[in-house]
Image (cartoon, rainbow, N blue to C red):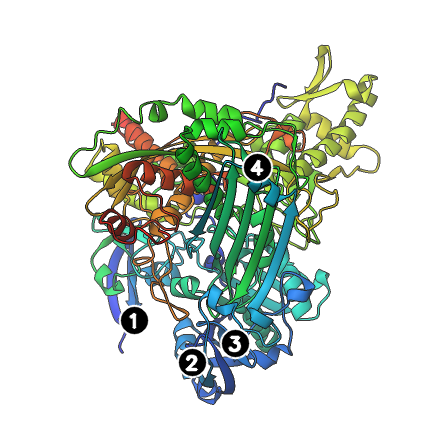
Amino acid sequence: MEKKKIRFTINGKRCEMEIKPWQTLLELIREDLKLTGTKEGCGEGECGSCTVIMGGRTVNSCLVPAMEADKQEILTIEGLSKGDKLHPIQEAFVEHSGMQCGFCTSGMIMSAKALLDENTDPSREEIREGISGNLCRCTGYAKIFESISAAAHAMKGEK
Amino acid sequence: MAEYSTIGKRVPRIDGRIKVTGDAKYAADYEMPGMLWCKIARSPHPHAKILDIDTSRAEKLPGVKGVLIGKDFGGWKWGWMPKTRDESPLAVDKVRYLGEAVAAVAAVDEDTTEEAAGLISVEYEILPGVFDSKEAMKDGAPQVHEHVKNNLSWDFHMDFGDVEKGFREADLVHEDRFETGRAITGYLEPPAAVALWDSSGITIWPAKQSPYFIYRHLAACFNLPLNKVRVIQPFIGGGFGGTKNDSLAGDFCSVMFSKMTGRPVKFIYSMEEVLRTCRRRHNMIVYNKMGMKRDGIITAMQSRVIADGGAYTAIGPLTMYLTGCISTLPYKLPNFKHDIYRIFTNNPISAAMRGHGVTHTRFAAEIQMEIMAEELGIDPVEVRLRNAITAPHETINKVTVHSCGLVDGIKTLSEHPVWKGKDKNRKNVDQISHGVGLSSSAYLGGARQRGHQSCGAVVRLCEDGTIDYLTGATDCGQGSDTVLVQIVAEELGIRIEDVDIKRVDTAYTPCDAGSYGSRVTVLAGEAARKAALDVRRQLADVASGIWNVGPEDIVFRAGNIYVKDSPDIKMPFKKLAQIACYSGAGAVIIGRGYSGYGIEELDFDKGVGNAGTSYSFTSQLTEVDVDMETGFVKCGRMVIAHDCGRPLNPVNVEAQSQGAAIQGMGQSIYERFVMDKGNTLNSNLADYKIPLSTDVPDIEFIDIIAEDPNGPYGAKEASEGAIVSSPPSIVSAIHDATGVWFKKLPVTPEKIAMALKGKNKNESL
């Protein structure tokens, strides 16, 4: 099959690429763009390790055809910090040990970002709901809830 | 207690930043120029003879660079002990479980490997299989391994005191059948590696929680000296025992392909391969018999356990040992008999998983004790306090306990509002019934394994006062790197950020058995402490020469060196480091340390002695709400009182226990492989239910301090205790809510609903 040209913005950078029509967004991100911060766990949209933000909402990039990235704006974990300055969500995860092995962390943080962009003051239940598409086997989620609450607090303080 | 600067402090993880930015590289993130991909072709049958393998079509596919079958490994096999070497990188003449590796392909990209693997044609003669451990023990059952009669993979027989006498002395004797489920460890990072064979031998970047296991396996398989095998540790996306302690078909085949082609070779298993073919927890049937006096004192316990070992031995003998060797904890047990049989079946291989071995028998004993106490009208707290051990204690099988916070933990929980209010909170609105359950457990830390258990550390001083710290111990997510760095910083009186822990690299780091058996903080922590002290001693000698005082009077604190009682005589650590490194022809300051704990004799055959160096004690409360119509269970709150000696990093200890308790919750009420004649029907994460964020209770964590002499700064293990305490506390809570004792894990909604509707009442639920 013919390759197709798409244009998109990823982490604030404009890109134009030729992609294979059967490629997933995850393959585009990890293999073509070498942004390996986004992980592949199950490859079936169940674990959420591959979560990125596209067009303002989270997607399981393993399920999204890369072609759908055309004219879209994509944010991955690599685009979250500004130079050496971590995003407040990242800072909160470091401060509150919101990660253990770290494999789910990129996807978890992207889900947290989408949640806090929508809702600056989420309740514990809304946090649970907001990351319910992201599996974590290490933490039992407790420190992740703490991290996201702390991030919400910090982000409100900044405004 | 000594005043520490970093030990015992809530220090953030040192790997936090690299993990939240996505910079941490895992095995699948590595790639090299010219790299090939490797894919395994697997058996669609659980038990079959391999008559012929035709690889010609795969070989002809454009892009394919090599194909391997079993005989290409020259008959080499591996196993946990010399006499249990029963696994080949690729099956040679027979497959013993569905999904067993039979061939491998290497090609220029991943898609081509998948296509090529599908072109390998294997002619099988299907053999009758056996999938039930009790059936497999019978005469005439299909034999999984030709030379193994009745499919007996391994057995242990432990016999202490006189159980018959104990049962005669008892006022109440109970016999029950318990069963634990078929569960997966559940790491999210599928196994992966990049392997390279060149003139310096093998270099491999694999996802392993015990990198020195594969180091030995590769040296043996490829007949190389150990100094020609270099295993470099990427970040590890979770381990939890079993698969990532061991080697895989993908590891051996990638290395072989690299040898054949001269190119680097990478593989990544799919999650389906993980759930179908990787090592899982043993399913065990536990026939438990317990004797109890009228006052609740346990007089004897006898366990007969049948474990489904799956198709190969793996680390199974150790699992079997652990089911029995600390059954004599955490309660006084004067008479104990334990017979366990690990049985080969045509199911996927069973092996280690967090809470290794202990979780099965502790679940049985804990629930049985509750059932009996209930019959005798004794409160769950009271029956535990009456039987609880206190330190010092030696069990009947010579397990020695030097510290024990069990009684403190039980008492703390008995005063907790969750327990005290359990009857008041029993609101039972609509069809929801509320219940609370209590459990206690013990787990070994600093596990010892037969053969190698070396654990060393090297601390190298740089001339600017920073530290290169080398250890063979592996952080697969538990946070041990942070704790080890805290220890080095503590002893040298410097900042955590001045100590850099290197990734494990077998070419440079000291040999270590890796992450299992809660051994890292206890053993590697002690090695780190000794290595740091070695550097401190060398530096103190230099300082004592400068200031004309004894080296014992030199204090290392807060980045400075000073003379005891004369804090004005001081210099920065950095300055002393420089002086020391530039002295004479240029001194090289290297500290060495190794753990000396737990080196006394252990009688592995009889179950006598210490399999660990110290023992943690965990008690747990769980609150549940059970929907009496649907059987759905919601865990509301958990309270964990955990004695890990002294928590060196309390945040990590909490985090470990929270994660373990939830993993235990999964096993208790959600997780199970659904098997059909060796076929795993739910080999995906939609159908195999790992707890989600919306499923988990709030967890309150309470540290019970009971410092142990056999651990750095008094530390013992953390987390394996909580995966053991979780199932019995949840099942007791479900009983409290429903009035039914469930004895088979997981306790799914349908089991509860059936029991409540009066069906299945006579079965072992």
Report if residue B131 is visible in the image: yes
Q: Mark 3 sits on what residue?
A: B140
Q: How far apart, in angstroms, are the residues tagged by discs 1 and 2?
A: 20 Å
Q: Are dots 3 and 1 in contact, CB under 8 Å?
A: no
Q: Earlier in the sequence, mark 4 or mark 3?
A: 3
The chain identifier of the residue carrying mark 3 reads B
Q: A54 or B519, which lies in front?
A: B519
Around disc 2, counting alpha carbons within 10 Å, would you say few (fewer than 14), some (14 to 19), or many (20 or more)?
A: many
Q: How far apart, in angstroms, are the residues tagged by discs 3 and 1?
A: 55 Å
Name the secondary structure under disc 2: helix
Looking at the rendered structure, whether the residues under marks 1 and 2 are on a common chain is answered as: no
Name the residue type under label 3: Gly
Q: Which mark is residue A20?
A: 1
Give how far across and how far down residue B532 sits, in percent. Answer: 69, 33
On the rendered image, what quadrant is the N terminus of chain A found in?
bottom left
Q: Which mark is residue B116?
A: 2
Around disc 3, counting alpha carbons within 10 Å, would you say few (fewer than 14), some (14 to 19), or many (20 or more)?
A: few
Labels 3, 1: front one: 3
Give how far across and how far down residue A68 sits, in percent. Answer: 21, 62
Q: Earlier in the sequence, mark 3 or mark 2?
A: 2
Name the residue type under label 1: Lys
